[in-house]
Amino acid sequence: MRRNWVAPAGSEEEKGFLDTLLDSGKLGKRELDYVRKWRDGDRHGAHFSGLMDVALEKNLKQQVMGELIYERAMKRHENLHANTWFVAYFISAGKKEKEMKEMLGLGDDGIRYHKDKIKQLILQEYNYELKSVKTEQISRWFLGL
């Protein structure tokens, strides 16, 4: 089972997501204990305390995180205007720039403009360097990851 399902293990992004999860009010005591241990870097304690079982992890992913990821994605979408939303959507759907230009009636500069707007939003949220925001990060960000 993949362990880095939201963000790289131990990263600030993962800690932020886990803090959101802890504050969601959707976890029981057992799940809260597990998530706190995981967030605080106690991977060993989370695994061997009996809390890290496949059923619990599956439950957290399906029931709680799906909703949180959806809410995060919708909040991000509110900051996107018209063609910027479509560019982000098409990137997440794996469309090539040529297809985007044809579908939106934009040229190279238009696509670049909207990608730069998306990158600026990602920069504001995660404090990335502009040149480090790649297509993969745009897709993950648009989808709420």
Image: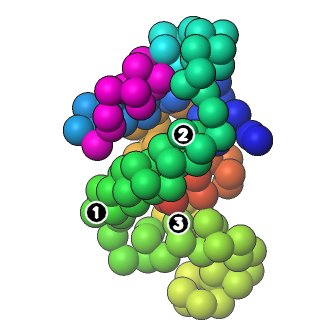
The residue stretch that appears in magenta: 26-36
Which colour assignment does the render follow? rainbow
Residue 23 image point, x, y percent: 26, 32
Determine if the magenta segment contains residue 32: yes
Residue under the point 32% across and 34% down = 28
Which callout, 2 or 1, points at the residue further toward the start of the chain? 2
Residue at 49 percent of width and 76 percent of height: 86
Which amino acid type is marked by label 3?
A: Ala
| Distance in Å between CA atoms under marks 3 and 2 | 33 Å
Whole-percent x and y of residue 22? 32, 29
Please determine whether, in this image, residue 138 is positioned above or below residue 88. above
- Check disc 2: other Cα within 10 Å, few if <14, some if 14-19, many if 20+: some
Q: Label 2's element?
A: helix
Of the image marks 3 and 1, the number of the one nearer the N terminus: 1
Q: Was residue 137 drawn as part of the magenta stretch in this picture?
A: no
**Res. 78 mark:** 1
Residue 88 is labelled as 3
Mark 3 surroundings within 10 Å by alpha-carbon count, few (fewer than 14), some (14 through 19), many (20 or more):
many
On the picture, is 62 further left or further right than 20?
Answer: right
In this view, the residue in front, 40 or 32, is 32
Q: Mark 2 or mark 1: which is in front? A: 2
Q: Position of residue 25 (x, y in %)?
A: 23, 38
- The residues bearing labels 2 and 1 have C-alpha atoms spaced at a distance of 32 Å
